[in-house]
Image: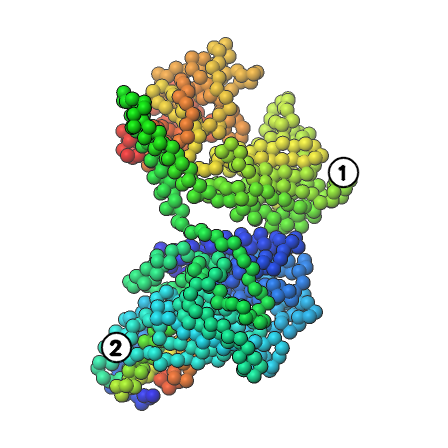
């Protein structure tokens, strides 16, 4: 059903739709959380409704029928809710969350081009139907409204009921709608058929078409609009709902909506001229009106999969500039939209931003090369050139910061998922928990955000499962029944720090230590500090749960969390006070596009060591250097032996000195807290470097994470500390030092990219 | 309403997709047929997608047929087409053009 993305002329629109869905679902989840906690108002309910409505509109455009059918019913439920015809109680909240889950899944299914089982989501649908039929939960005053009049929507497989709207009942509104599309309406990808079908959903409709304007075929402009309509609509819905049907086309038509009384006398007239109103609903799926138009209009040669799909996106788009047709007279509309803050944002392809980031990276490099040239030339320091260079450098730095900030997003999108997890897990383990989130607006690079969700989820689960006590235990310990988990984010020293604090029992050090010994994580006779014991929970293959629960014990231990975080250039640590609670702290770089590095020299090469990994740098006296049987060196620092890796030898310089006491040893922390020493000749200084992929430009090299270009134009390799810690130091006598580790068999190339090669690929 | 079937009219099969982008070519096809002066006999069995612009082309073609005393008939209408005519309020007109096998 779903055409392959590559052949699909609407792939781009779909992509945008799914992005929009993700955002809408995130917001929706957060708002549902508010509903659950009871701290919601009408606007919260409207926001949830709008989210579902927007998803429905988009789903309809792309013919995701299951999604349309489901959102259709979900909308009715939310409608009852926002009209205060349902009481918010736990079963209702459950239904809302269940429906939310189904909707999220349906979106994922659609995104992956999969079709869910026919059974899928039926339980949620059944729960919704229960409310809609009035069997469950309706407020006493509202029995008339649970029975919504619905006319079958052609693409809609949902259960359809047709209420007896003929009989004059209370709450039936009668509208006369005069709808005259402007000439260009179709070209703007607006389709009257869709509008009419939406109206049909609202109630009983009589349609009168006027084809007078239609010329004979030879004079017809096929993409112009000539028809106009008068609809008479009897509906239980209010004026707002009718307006909503037209909200996306208001610019493209003349619209008059008349509210008729019982005897068809005019109660109120509302003429909506075709100009943009000030609707603040941000349904916009699409940024670029022009691009969209041209995309649709110019798409002639493309096979069109879905007529409807073609037309709807623009409808969905329009609200950016579109309208609330309503002015005052909405006598029955119970739901005047509260003002939402208008967000002046545009949607930009990440690729474009990445290209921009790269370009600015190049600019930074070029600038520093120029600066070096100027410095090397015997130019007067006060000359215009020198001054200009300084100014240029300043502007470029600013430019870089600003470009980087484009990719920054608030952590809210990740944090918003957590209340849900806490809710589900706390129910499962029978603990009472309050989740407090702070600093949701803290911004971090998009790439980092994407990688953050899993570790955070796991850590929150871990805190809930292991950290917090049961209500009984808490009472016994003199604490409140309800535990607290605090999730916070803040910027600190150019990094983002995320903390997860719980007021549970803290880490059971005795148990951790004995388990660690049992599992051979530490030696039997090891004596460890409290802090070291606490951090053992991050050791590979470690689990302190007496029995593996299905929450934390999913085969994903805290070691995986640590590994994930470290892969992002971050660190994770824990501090715990027995009986009082534990605090997990994640620190992450704000971006993965630049890196703070220490430039070191080894032999004639320069390398970058990520500052983040560096613990300290020492120049060991020869008395502290020991040689192992295999020729490798260890140094003794404060009573501990640390393996030393000669960077120069590691990368092939067999003649390099192997004596750490003659150089410097940079102590770095690798995966799993393992410390190694990197033997280098000198430290050349600290610098922020733009990361260039080695895989993309050359090929992956073991021990090297990526490359950068220094101010003098030379390529400099960024060391992969974790890989280095695991790598064997090549045997001294062997000329083909690294052969087994990273030279592809099919090539005779030397292991390291030659300087010429790197210049070529990065030029 | 031109309802009598002109036996000499060639049957034109309407495409599967009658979307906005198809409107122009539909117009050209129908114009060419109209130039033959033998009426329009359209087979709508394949139609799976319909848009208002294409309906406009069809209705305009029908008007032109009336004006030039040619016949206009749509046979084998797919449900999608029937529904679209109905939704747009063209039920009555459509009944007059429709031949049901």
- Spatial distance from mark 2 to mark 1, Cα to Cα? 88 Å
Callout count: 2
> Residue at the spot x=29%, y=28% of the render?
A385
Q: Is residue A253 shown left or right of residue B8? A: right
In terms of image quadrants, where is residue B12?
bottom left
Chain ID of residue with mark 1: A
**Whether labels 2 and 1 share one chain:** yes
Q: Is residue B8 visible?
A: yes
Height in image: B58 above or below A105? below
- Image spot of residue A655 (x, y percent): 35, 16
Q: x and y percent of residue A242 in the render?
A: 51, 70
To which residue does mark 2 refer? A218
Badge 1 density bin: few <14, some 14–19, many ≥20, Cα 10 Å: some
Where does the image place residue A485, in percent across and percent down from the top left?
64, 42
Q: Earlier in the sequence, mark 2 or mark 1?
A: 2
Q: Which mark is residue A477?
A: 1
């Amino acid at each position: 059903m779903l055409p392959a993305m590559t052949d699909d002329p609407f792939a781009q629109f779909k992509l945008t739709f799914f992005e929009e869905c993700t955002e809408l679902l995130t917001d929706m989840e957060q708002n549902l959380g508010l509903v659950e906690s009871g701290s919601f108002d009408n606007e919260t309910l409207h926001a949830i409704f709008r989210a579902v409505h927007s998803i429905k509109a988009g789903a309809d455009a792309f013919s995701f029928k299951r999604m349309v059918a489901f959102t259709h019913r979900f909308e009715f439920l939310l409608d009852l809710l926002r009209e205060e015809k349902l009481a918010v109680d736990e079963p209702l909240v459950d239904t809302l969350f269940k429906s939310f889950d189904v909707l999220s899944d349906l979106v994922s299914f659609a995104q992956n081009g999969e079709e869910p089982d026919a059974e899928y989501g039926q339980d949620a649908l059944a729960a919704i139907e229960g409310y809609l039929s009035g069997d469950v939960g309706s407020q006493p005053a509202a029995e008339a409204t649970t029975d919504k009049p619905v006319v079958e929507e052609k693409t809609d497989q949902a259960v359809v009921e047709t209420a007896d709207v003929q009989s004059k009942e209370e709450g039936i509104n009668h509208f006369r709608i005069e709808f005259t599309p402007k000439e260009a309406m179709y070209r703007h990808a607006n389709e009257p058929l869709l509008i009419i079908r939406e109206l049909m959903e609202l109630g009983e409709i009589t349609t009168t078409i006027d084809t007078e304007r239609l010329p004979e075929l030879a004079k017809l402009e096929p993409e112009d609009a000539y028809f106009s309509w008068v609809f008479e609509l009897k509906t239980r819905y209010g004026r707002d709902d009718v307006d909503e049907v037209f909200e996306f086309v208001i610019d493209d038509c003349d619209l008059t909506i008349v509210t008729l009384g019982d005897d068809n006398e005019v109660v109120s007239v509302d003429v909506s001229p075709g100009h943009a109103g000030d609707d603040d609903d941000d349904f916009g799926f699409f940024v670029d009106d022009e691009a969209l138009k041209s995309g649709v209009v110019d798409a002639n040669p493309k096979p069109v999969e879905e007529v409807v799909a073609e037309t709807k996106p623009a409808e969905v788009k329009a609200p950016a500039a579109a309208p609330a047709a309503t002015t005052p007279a909405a006598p029955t509309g119970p739901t005047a939209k509260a003002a939402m803050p208008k967000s002046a944002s545009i949607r930009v392809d990440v690729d474009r931003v990445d290209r921009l980031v790269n370009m600015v990276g190049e600019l930074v490099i070029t600038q520093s090369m120029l600066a070096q040239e100027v410095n090397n030339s015997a130019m007067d320091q006060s000359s215009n050139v020198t001054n200009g260079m300084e100014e240029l450098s300043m502007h470029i730095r600013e430019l870089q910061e600003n470009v980087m900030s484009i990719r920054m997003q608030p952590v809210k999108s990740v944090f918003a998922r957590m209340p849900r997890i806490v809710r589900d897990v706390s129910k499962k383990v029978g603990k009472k928990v309050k989740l407090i989130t702070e600093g949701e607006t803290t911004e971090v690079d998009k790439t980092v955000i994407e990688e953050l969700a899993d570790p955070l989820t796991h850590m929150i689960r871990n805190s809930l499962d292991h950290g917090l006590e049961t209500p009984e235990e808490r009472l016994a310990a003199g604490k409140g029944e309800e535990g607290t988990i605090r999730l916070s984010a803040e910027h600190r020293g150019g990094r983002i720090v995320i903390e997860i604090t719980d007021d549970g029992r803290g880490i059971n050090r005795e148990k951790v230590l004995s388990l660690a010994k049992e599992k051979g994580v530490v030696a039997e006779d090891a004596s460890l500090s409290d802090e070291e014991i606490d951090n053992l929970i991050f050791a590979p293959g470690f689990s302190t749960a007496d029995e593996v629960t299905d929450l934390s014990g999913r085969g994903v231990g805290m070691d995986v969390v640590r590994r994930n975080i470290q892969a992002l250039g971050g660190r994770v640590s824990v501090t715990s006070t027995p009986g009082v609670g534990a605090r997990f702290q994640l620190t992450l770089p704000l971006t993965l596009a630049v890196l703070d590095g220490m430039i070191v020299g080894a032999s004639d090469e320069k390398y970058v060591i990520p500052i983040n990994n560096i613990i300290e740098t020492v120049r060991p006296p020869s008395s502290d250097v020991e040689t192992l049987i295999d020729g490798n060196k260890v140094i003794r620092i404060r009573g501990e032996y640390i393996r030393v890796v000669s960077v120069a030898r590691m990368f092939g310089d067999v003649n390099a000195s192997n004596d750490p006491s003659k150089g410097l040893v940079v102590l770095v922390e690798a995966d799993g807290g393992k410390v190694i020493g990197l033997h280098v000749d000198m430290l050349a200084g600290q610098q922020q470097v733009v990361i260039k992929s080695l895989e993309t430009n050359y090929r992956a090299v073991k021990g090297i994470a990526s490359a950068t270009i220094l101010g003098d134009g030379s390529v400099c390799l960024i060391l992969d500390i974790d890989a280095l810690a695991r790598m064997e130091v090549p045997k001294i006598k062997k000329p083909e030092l690294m052969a087994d580790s990273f030279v592809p068999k099919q090539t005779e190339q030397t292991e390291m990219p030659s300087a010429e090669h790197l210049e070529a690929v990065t030029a | 309403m031109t309802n009598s079937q002109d036996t000499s009219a060639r049957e034109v099969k309407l495409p599967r997709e009658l979307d906005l982008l198809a409107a122009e070519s539909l117009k050209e096809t129908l114009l060419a047929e109209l130039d033959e002066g033998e009426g329009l006999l359209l087979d709508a069995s394949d139609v799976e997608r319909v848009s208002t612009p294409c309906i406009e082309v069809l209705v305009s073609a029908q008007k032109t047929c009336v004006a030039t005393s040619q016949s206009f008939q749509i046979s084998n209408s797919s449900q999608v087409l029937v529904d679209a005519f109905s939704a747009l309020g063209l039920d009555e007109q459509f009944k007059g053009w429709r031949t049901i096998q």
